[in-house]
């Protein structure tokens, strides 16, 4: 086993956690995230070892193992094995390769094993975490983290990101958040939550209809539409510093969308009389007009390279999704099936656009392949399913649905499998938008 390289915490005042260097990562792919028939890999996550053995440490160790298992299972890549099937007691097993009898894990079907050791002292917590291939008896990745007790969940998620990177070559979703609209406070306000629905926080207190949140690439800014002043205006807000801008031109100011890696937005403005797509600076000043057409052009979304915009237009008589190349100005209609196609979301890989489509009295979510123009239906027979938004690694789609009565936020894979509710708050939740990875 290659040694785990320790990188000590520089200072006790360091804000949160320090992720420490690990060993060689797997140089092969276990998981093909482009495979719609992905087989979930059986994984065992026994309780982590409490190094000091005192009750608070044992409780933290068990909680950390539970957090890790839940986070990895959320990705849809793994089948976490029931601890009742384990042939070895976690409290007696070793956590490094020489002390692990891998046959005990292959015998129950575990192809991957995560072991961990946790020590707790004063306000600090330290964890050693390792991922093994049980059939090869091989360490795939090992990390050590140290930080404040309150950073335990972040440490676990940091390791989960390392696991996904080792197995797929992609950093995954663990540093991302989801913005959404909830009317729980009595008005439609913007909330944010972790990728798995944990830690929901109310962002706006406008006491008015507030819609269409969108994240800047660095996750530091949110732009949204609010009727706070009696009509739809665009608010551009820094989430850390209490500053921002307002776009309140006459008429409609709505559906802002941040440009990739730029302090610029696309949005719909109607001050000239007809709702058209415009490019704006991050301060809300107009850079240029993008669309020129009769009818409503709304809900722009950027391609990942920032060279194209997809948007909704009713110029052909019904709302359909169009794409404009911002360099050449060439436009094309993307959707022809369905009488009402809206809320496009461009995949991070740039090859697909998810959208919602009205049919038979309800909305369902589709994905259209931009190469073949073939569309794949992701939801069916489950009420209205709307406002899809891709996860930063393109593996999952978050959306809103009233399949259980009130509108809630759900997630599913990019192929429509593993559909499950993300959270349940008072009132109804809609308009989810997934951020990129937010690295603090």
Image (tube, rainbow, N blue to C red):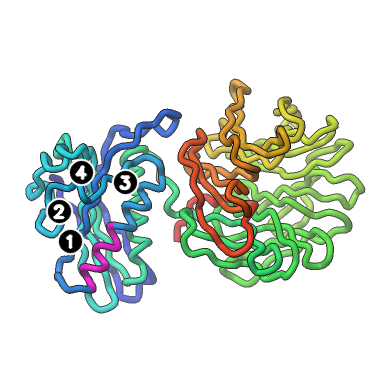
Q: Badges 2 and 1: C-beta atoms under 8 Å apart?
A: yes
Residue 58 in magenta?
yes
- For numbered disc 4, what is the local secondary structure? strand
Q: Which residue is mark 1?
A: 49
How far, Cα to Cα, is label 3 from label 4? 10 Å
Q: Which residue is mark 3?
A: 163
Residue 151: where, in percent of width, then height? 36, 67
How far, Cα to Cα, is label 3 from label 1? 19 Å
Q: Which residue is mark 4?
A: 132
Q: Badges 1 and 4: C-beta atoms under 8 Å apart?
A: no
Q: Residues within 10 Å of mark 4 (few under 14, many from 20)?
A: many
Residue 225 shows up from this direction: yes
Q: Which residue is mark 2?
A: 95
Residue 352: where, in percent of width, then height? 58, 32
Tell which residue pokes out farthest to the bottom in this image.
122
Q: For the point 23% across and 38% down, which residue is it? A: 111
Mark closer to the chain start, 3 or 1: 1
Q: Nearer the viewer, residue 265 or 332?
A: 332
Residue 139: where, in percent of width, then height? 18, 43
Q: Which residues are magenta?
A: 56-65
Task: Locate residue 342: give its quadrant.
Answer: top right
Q: Is residue 36 left or right of residue 159?
A: right
Q: For the point 48% across and 64% down, which residue is it? A: 199
Q: Which label is found at residue 359?
A: none
How far, Cα to Cα, is label 2 from label 3? 16 Å
Which tag is nearer the camera, tag 3 or tag 1? 1
Q: Name the quarter where the N terminus is drawn.
A: top left
- For numbered disc 3, what is the local secondary structure? helix
């Amino acid at each position: 086993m290659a040694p785990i390289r320790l990188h000590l915490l520089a200072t006790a005042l360091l804000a949160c956690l320090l992720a420490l260097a690990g060993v060689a990562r797997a140089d092969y792919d276990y998981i093909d995230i482009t495979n719609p028939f992905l087989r979930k890999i059986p994984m065992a996550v026994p309780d982590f070892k409490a190094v000091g053995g005192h009750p608070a440490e044992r409780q933290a160790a068990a909680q950390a193992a539970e957090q890790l298992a839940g986070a990895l299972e959320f990705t849809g890549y793994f089948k976490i094995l029931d601890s009742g099937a384990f042939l070895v007691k976690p409290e007696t097993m070793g956590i490094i390769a020489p002390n692990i009898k891998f046959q005990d894990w292959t015998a129950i079907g575990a192809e991957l094993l995560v072991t961990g050791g946790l020590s707790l002292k004063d306000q600090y917590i330290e964890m050693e975490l390792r991922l093994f291939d049980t059939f090869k008896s091989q360490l795939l990745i090992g990390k050590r983290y140290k930080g404040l007790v309150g950073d335990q969940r972040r440490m676990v998620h940091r390791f989960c990101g390392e696991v996904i990177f080792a197995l797929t070559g992609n950093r995954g979703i663990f540093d991302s958040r989801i913005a959404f609209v909830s009317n729980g406070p009595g008005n439609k306000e913007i909330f944010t939550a972790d990728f798995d629905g944990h830690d929901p926080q109310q962002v706006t207190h406008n006491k008015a209809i507030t819609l269409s949140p969108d994240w800047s690439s660095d996750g530091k800014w949110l732009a949204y539409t609010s009727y706070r002043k009696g009509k739809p205006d665009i608010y551009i807000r820094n989430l850390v510093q209490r500053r921002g801008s307002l776009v309140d031109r006459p008429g409609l100011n709505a559906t802002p969308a941040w440009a990739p890696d730029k302090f610029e937005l696309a949005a719909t403005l109607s001050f000239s009389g007809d709702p058209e797509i415009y490019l704006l600076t991050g301060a809300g000043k107009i850079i240029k007009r993008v669309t020129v057409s009769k009818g409503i052009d709304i809900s722009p979304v950027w391609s990942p390279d920032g060279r194209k915009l997809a948007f909704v237009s009713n110029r052909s008589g019904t709302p359909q999704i169009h794409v404009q190349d911002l360099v050449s100005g060439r436009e094309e209609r993307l959707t022809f099936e369905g009488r009402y196609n809206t809320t496009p979301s461009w995949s991070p890989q740039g090859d697909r656009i998810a959208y919602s489509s009205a049919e038979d009295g309800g909305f369902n979510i589709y994905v259209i392949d931009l190469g073949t123009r073939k569309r794949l239906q992701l939801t069916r027979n489950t009420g209205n399913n709307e406002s899809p938004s891709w996860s930063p690694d393109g593996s999952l789609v978050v959306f809103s649905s009233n399949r259980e009565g009130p509108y809630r936020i759900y997630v599913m894979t990019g192929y429509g499998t593993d559909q499950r509710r993300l959270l349940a708050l008072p009132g109804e939740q809609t308009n989810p938008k997934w951020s990129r990875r937010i690295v603090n």
